[in-house]
Amino acid sequence: MKKILLPLCMLALFVSCTNDNEPGTGNAPVPIQVGGSIGMEATVTKAAINPDDANPAEFQAGIAGWESNAAADYSQAPVWNTSFPLKAYKTAQSDYKVSTGQYYNQDEAVTTYMKAWHPAGTLSGTTVTFTNDNGTEDAMLAGIVSGNKTNEGTVHQLNFKHMTTQIKFEAKVDANLPSGTSFNVTSLQLVKDDNKGVTLNVPTGFDLSKAPDADGAVEFTPKDAIAMSPNATVSSTTTATSISGEFLIKPCKKIAVKAVASEVTYDAVVVGAPAGGFVAGTAYTVTLTFSGAQILVTATVDEWTNATTNPGDVTII
């Protein structure tokens, strides 16, 4: 499996000028600003976010700051937090800035340590929570950056990373069916199956007391099922039709897929992951091949991370 980690939205973080010649030496507050895009207000995106320098996706991020003249104590609530609109770029955009409305401490001996995340959600203490009923939220965390009032003009880069596995779908018709056969796909689900060891968890928060790459930094909630309602007509026997929408779930070893097409409900089928499991930052495309009362299922891997490992075909009956 070929893996490409997608750094999302390299964000410029810097301070404005004071009235003095030396950066950060005056008495005026030094605002904290972040980079993103110019003059456009972003919306909260309930979908997988893909970085693109030419046409970046919009998303809403949260950021919090801890102040200390030594190492930051992330077990304590941050001094401040806010949210702001951003766009997802692959590379840093040095000519763009957005004010957070926050300022560095006036004491240059005090450093502000910052963590950023998406979705912005609601912060209480060191815990961020957000609603995620059907596994549509692209949970991301950025690495820690820091600075103080002397860092005027310094660019601090925030590198967001996907913390979930993305499950996408496409479908085609079995070549053995009569020419012209088509199916209308109206429901796709991922389901939990305790008997077959299939778990299903979606992100619902962050624990900011933990390092961004530590276990438990993302908080997950178990689900019995999550669903989408496409309206996709599938008729080709050779080229799979992409189905709009995706699920964003906790990395796992296997998933169970359930479908409704042309008013027929198909039993859930278990799809095993490639070696190493369904991993964070990777998008897997499940190909459904409709064949009468059965669906043949194949899982491959797509953008965010690109890979071609095929875990094999299984049949939904």
Image (tube, rainbow, N blue to C red):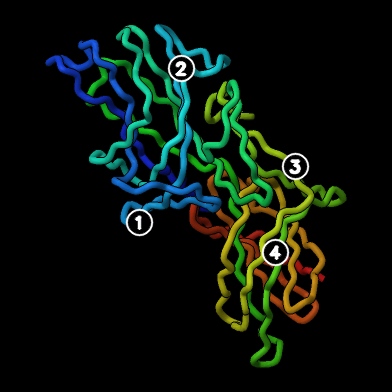
Determine the residue positioned at 52% across, 13% down: 73
Location of the C terminus (image quadrant): bottom right
SS for callout 1: loop
- Identify residue for label 3: 222
Q: Is residue 166 visible?
A: yes
Asked whether, in this view, residue 158 is left or right of residue 123, the answer is left
Decide which of tag 2 and tag 1 comes sooner along the chain.
Answer: 1
- Sequence-wise, the earlier of marks 3 and 4 is 4
Distance between mark 2 and mark 3 Cα atoms: 31 Å
The amino acid on which the numbered mark 3 sits, given as a three-letter code, is Pro
Residue at mark 1: 55
| Furthest-bottom residue in this view | 179
Inter-mark Cα distance, 2 to 1: 33 Å
Residue on which the image places disc 2: 66
Q: Which residue is at 37% across, 27% downward?
A: 101
* Dot 2 alpha-carbon crowd within 10 angstroms: few under 14, some 14 to 19, many 20 or more: many
Q: Residue furthest right?
A: 195
The kind of secondary structure element at disc 2 is strand
**Crowd around label 3: few <14 · some 14–19 · many ≥20 (10 Å):** some
Task: In the rendered structure, find residue 188 and report the number of the disc placed on it.
Answer: 4
Image location (x, y in percent) of residue 62 = 48, 34
